[in-house]
């Protein structure tokens, strides 16, 4: 935990950097925290980087928009520390001017690897969609349709995290996922199963309603999704599964047979 003395030191060094370095295009923000003596696995603790990033946003005040090249340099040229600071800064600034900072976020995402994309969405987008779903949920849906499979996967997982905190958003999120069932899901099928399991845990009645709507489907992908999502006993599921076990379609029969075993096991337990 940062001591008061070190917080004051970091505040002062941030002020010096913003006054004497940043206006000259000197983006070596490491000078702010490099003297911090403690290391975690040989690195400056994340708490220190967050403190510095928050200081930067606070001290820049209304001038924050003047320094987009600095934020981009943090992401592109300043290694792990820069990426941590970038995510923290964007989490504070994006909602102030979405039209300015969403392109900055998307630019970073375009060069990020899988782990970095997950971090950006968790740090920047998750707090925003929890507070302002009407403003940002469509953007996450857009990410979920991306041709970038890492971004697609991260966005879908983000939506699962969202409904764990905002149960009122389950209908919107489920409808988005269900719309994708019209197309081959490929590797995303695992995330769709995870979504259904999450809904079942949070709101069993809503989960059963999904079955009521799609329990007569003959689409192999939909049947496989529903059958793979069973984690508890629901009597309403028995009839659909029984019919599918007698199907001449091998995929339907296989998925339903497995689901029937799980359902009966849950019934007995």
Image (cartoon, rainbow, N blue to C red):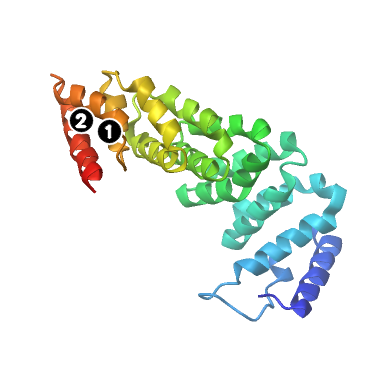
**Element type where label 1 sits in the image:** helix
Q: Is residue 151 above or below residue 221?
A: below
Of residue 230 and residue 106, the one placed in the foreground of this image is 230
* Alpha carbon distance from label 2 to label 1: 6 Å
Answer left or right for 189 relative to 123. left
Rendering coords of residue 156 (x, y %): 47, 38
Rendering coords of residue 244 (x, y %): 20, 23
Rendering coords of residue 199 (x, y %): 44, 38
Q: Is residue 128 above or below residue 61?
A: above
Q: Is residue 97 above or below residue 241?
A: below
Q: What residue is shown at x 81% (from left), y 74% (from top)?
A: 8
Residue 127 visible in the shown view? yes
For marks 2 and 1, the one nearer the N-term is 1
Answer left or right for 70 relative to 191. right
Answer left or right for 151 relative to 14. left
Q: What residue is shown at x 44% (from left), y 22% (from top)?
A: 179
Residue at which label 2 appears: 256
Name the quadrant containing residue 99: top right
Asked whether the residues under the numbered discs 2 and 1 touch, taking CB atoms below 8 Å apart as contact, a structural biologist would say yes
Q: What residue is shown at x 55% (from left), y 42% (from top)?
A: 162
Answer left or right for 37 relative to 57. left
Residue at which label 1 appears: 227
């Amino acid at each position: 935990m940062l001591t008061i003395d070190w917080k004051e030191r970091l505040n002062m060094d941030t002020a010096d950097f913003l006054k004497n370095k940043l206006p000259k295009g000197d983006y070596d923000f490491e000078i702010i925290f490099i003297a911090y003596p403690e290391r975690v696995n040989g690195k400056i603790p994340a708490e220190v980087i967050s403190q510095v990033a928050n200081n930067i946003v606070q001290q820049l005040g209304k001038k924050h928009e003047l320094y987009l090249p600095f934020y981009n340099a943090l992401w592109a040229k300043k290694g792990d520390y820069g990426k941590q600071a970038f995510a923290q800064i964007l989490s504070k600034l994006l909602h102030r001017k979405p039209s300015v900072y969403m392109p900055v976020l998307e630019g970073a995402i375009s060069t990020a690897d899988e782990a970095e994309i997950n971090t950006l969405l968790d740090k920047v987008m998750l707090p925003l969609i929890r507070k302002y779903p009407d403003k940002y949920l469509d953007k996450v849906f857009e990410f979920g349709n991306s041709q970038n499979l890492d971004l697609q996967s991260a966005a879908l997982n983000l939506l699962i995290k969202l409904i764990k905190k905002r149960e009122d958003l389950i209908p919107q999120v489920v409808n988005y996922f269900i719309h994708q069932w019209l197309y081959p899901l490929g590797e995303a099928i695992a995330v769709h199963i995870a979504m259904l399991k999450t809904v079942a845990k949070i709101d069993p009645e809503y989960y059963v309603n999904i079955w009521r709507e799609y329990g007569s489907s003959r689409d192999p992908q939909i049947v496989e999704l529903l059958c793979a999502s069973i984690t508890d006993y629901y009597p309403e599921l028995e009839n659909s599964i029984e019919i599918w076990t007698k199907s001449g379609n091998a995929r339907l029969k296989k998925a339903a047979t497995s689901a029937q075993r799980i359902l009966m096991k849950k019934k007995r337990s």
